[in-house]
Amino acid sequence: MRNKNGQEEIVGFGIILIVIAVIALIFISLTLNKTGKAEVEDFESSSFLKALMEKTTSCEKNANLVAIKDLVFECGREYMCSNGEYSCDVLNETLEQSLHENWRVGSQNPIKGYSLKVNYEGDIYFNMLEGNITSEYKGSMQNYSKVNENIEIYFKVYY
Amino acid sequence: MVSNKAQIKIQQMVFMLLAVFILFVLIGLIVMSSRLSKLKNSVTELKEKEALELVSKLANSPEFSCGNSYGNQKSDCIDYDKLMALKSNINNYKDFWGVSNIEVRKMPNKDVNCTFENYPNCDAIRLINEEMLGYSVSNFVSVCYKEKEGETVSNKCDIGKLIISYEEAEL
Amino acid sequence: MKKKAQLDTSFAWIFAIIVGAVVLSLAIYGVYKFSNMQRTQQSAESSKQVDVYLDALESGYETGQKINLVAPVETRILSYCTLDQEFGRQKIQILEKTYDRWTQTGVNITSRNKYIFSENPIEGKKFIAFSKPYEFPSENSYEFSFKIADLIYLISSEDNYCFIDAPYEIEREIENLNADNLMTENCSEESLKICFDGNEDDCYAEVERNNNGNGIVTKYSKEMPFDSDALMYAAIFSYKELYECQLSRVIKRAEQLTLIYEEKARIEMTQGCTADMGANLAGFRSILHEYDYSNELYIISNEAKRINKQNSLSGECKLW
């Protein structure tokens, strides 16, 4: 019978090479995997809240448009805007609209819900919850003070 | 009959050495591609970190910030009028911030790009190129501008988004 | 008797040894090249990381931010400045001490938007970087000037600086930085003396500062005029050639910013603002364009005060 040792050795070696090549392909595909972006970055919720507070509204005082952070104080004092609108109505409308425009919530979306709470001198003046509350969230808080007046705003994004 | 045993042995040796050499080359390729991928990720990660820092700080850069021109001193506020002025001089600022493009959008965004003809009736200023290529990071900012209301000039501020795009490292 | 078998065996051995030696040499060469590449990568990463950490010093609302940079091994930082193109360039090179010698990789990280003032080189394992915003001076405290850039000061924690007889606001600023190697009292013998009243000997730097914040820093017998505390620190922590180069870069940036404000004035004209500032800024920009040397800083400062006053009187149409 012919000696086929050489052929057997080469076949064996070929099998080893194929196994290594398969392992290498799996290894390369794993190392090239990239991690995705977080749903909400740390700075996004606090930046949004800061920008929201500086947003001007349709309420006028002394020929200037009043920003939301100042409008909260005016609402607490039950101020009527120069154009006849009630400050608290303008505040509610502007806050709701701004939140809807900037945060899309839903079960299909990465953001599952958000909540915004505005306190004036300890009393809740605005409280909005949209979507669902989950155990993972990013939140921020801003507070502003004038003489004898204090407001606190809490914002949370659930994902 | 001439014995070919020696030739056969040499052939066997050659094949064996060739196979061992190919094995080492394959292992070497695996290691090199892994290292190259790590280096590429490392450079891309650093670029992303740079872009994230830049997003946080760009709004306070002299070319973007509101300063005291909209009432009191504001931080994280972008002067939209100044941004449009920057756009007209952007050729001098290519490669200045080390990113491929910067865009500032007023929210809600109807995707109307700002040009010198339609400003201020628009809501997105794209600074360096017309397209946002590569990866992008974004942050909320205040966007302020002057607007004529009857006979007076008013300061208006909206919520905006600052978007920075950067390209993946080429290696 | 034929001895084919013996010849056959020894030839195979020779062949195997030659090929083995070639493969081994290739492998050793590959490892050597690879380790060089790793060192280069590490140095480039460190340099880029420094660049990114220094980004954190671009201050917004806060002033005088400080960060600590800690290196794993003894490190040398070289800082260069060039004046090419519109904004010039800041270059940082980092060398690391391995096996008792400085590893020269020739890798430079460049940045167009940073202005770093330091001695060249600075060495150590810990470095301190802090920043101050630079803006042109105003006549009165209620007038605002526009910020031009954040100036970054980079020092080694191994160098101790002692501020002798510094004005109150400078002392407070140094104390608030809370850096172990920046002192205003109880200084050690080896510390570098920054003398403010001209009565001390053996000063590393002499500072003549007026009440309105301008003056001259004299170091290594070379004078560096300044018009604000930000530039004063820049002169103290760097040297003449770098100070002049970085100041030129800062003035180039001011020139571009002035051009932007001119265009902003034109845009806001369509919203009802007047164009008075635009014409004045064009004149200021040509003064900035003519700038050559720090001796001319007072010309710019005087004109800047006039421009700032005009801007503060523009009411709702303030440009900055």
Image: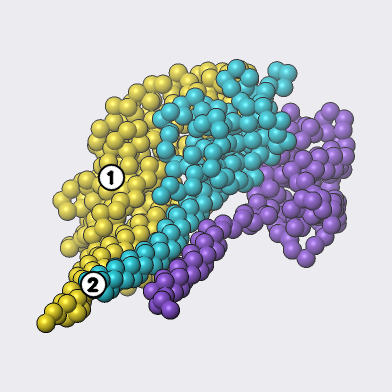
Chain colours: A purple, B cyan, C yellow
Residue drawn at the location 48% of the way across and 42% of the way down: B99
A36 vs A4, left or right, is right
C101 vs B63, left or right, is left
Please tell me whether residue A54 is drawn above or below residue A149 in the rendered image: above
Dots 2 and 1: beta carbons under 8 Å?
Answer: no
Give the percent coordinates (x, y) of residue C117.
32, 51
Q: Identify the amino acid type marked 1.
A: Cys
Q: Identify the amino acid type marked 2.
A: Met
Give the percent coordinates (x, y) of residue C236.
28, 54
Residue under numbered circle 2? B1
Give the percent coordinates (x, y) of residue C110.
34, 47
Camera-side residue of C196 and B1: B1
Residue under numbered circle 1? C81
Q: What's the chain of the residue with tag 2?
A: B
Asked if residue A66 shows in the view, the reply is yes
Residue drawn at the location 23% of the way across and 72% of the way down: B1
Q: What's the chain of the residue with tag 1?
A: C
A129 vs A46, left or right, is right
Quadrant housing the N terminus of chain C: bottom left
